[in-house]
Amino acid sequence: MLNNSIKEFQKKSLKERFLFVMGMAIFLAYLILGLVFIFWKSMPIVMDFNYRIAFGVLLIVYAFIRFFRVFNSNNE
């Protein structure tokens, strides 16, 4: 299964592979930023704790939405 995925990935054009890698990088950036907002206690941005949790969860949900969009566009 992994070999099939790698072969399909290599069949894509250079532009499609680049966009896939950039999409995954943006997914990771949003995921890490959401986790930073949730778990970093002494954050330099002054926000109420409840708002920090809500904003972190929102960023994580948005990261997974982007992940599924990139993953689905790669399967086509």
Image: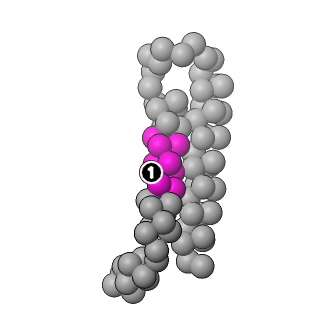
Residue 7: x percent and y percent?
37, 84
What residue is rendered at 49% in x and 36% in y?
Answer: 33
Q: Main secondary structure of the magenta part?
A: helix
**Quadrant hosting residue 68:** bottom right
**Residue 53 seen by the camera:** yes
Q: Is mark 1 on a helix, strand or loop?
A: helix
Number of other residues with Cα within 10 Å of mark 1, as a class: few under 14, some 14 to 19, many 20 or more: few
* Left or right of 15, for residue 57: right
Q: In which quarter of the image is the N terminus?
A: bottom left
Q: Say whether residue 71 is left or right of residue 9.
A: right
Q: What residue type is labelled 1?
A: Ala
Q: Is 27 above or below relative to 19?
A: above
Residue at left offset 46%, top offset 77%: 12
Rendering quarter of residue 73: bottom right
* Coloration of the structure image: one colour
| Magenta stretch in the rendered image | 22-32
Between 31 and 49, the residue placed more toward the observer is 31
Which residue of the protein is positioned furthest toward the front in this rendering?
Answer: 14
Q: For this view, does 25 lie left or right of residue 71?
A: left
| Residue at the spot of label 1 | 25
Which residue is rendered at x = 57% and y = 63% of the image?
70
Q: In this view, does 7 lie above or below 39?
A: below
For the point 50% across and 68% down, the residue is 16
Tell me the quadrant of the picture where the C terminus can be found: bottom right
Image: 1 above or below 67: below
- Residue 19 location (% of width, % of height): 50, 60
Asked whether 49 falls inside the magenta stretch, the response is: no
Residue 15, compared with residue 75, is above or below; it is: above
Whether the magenta-drawn stretch holds residue 29 is answered as yes
Q: Which of 54 and 9 is in front in this view?
A: 9
Q: Quadrant of residue 56?
A: top right
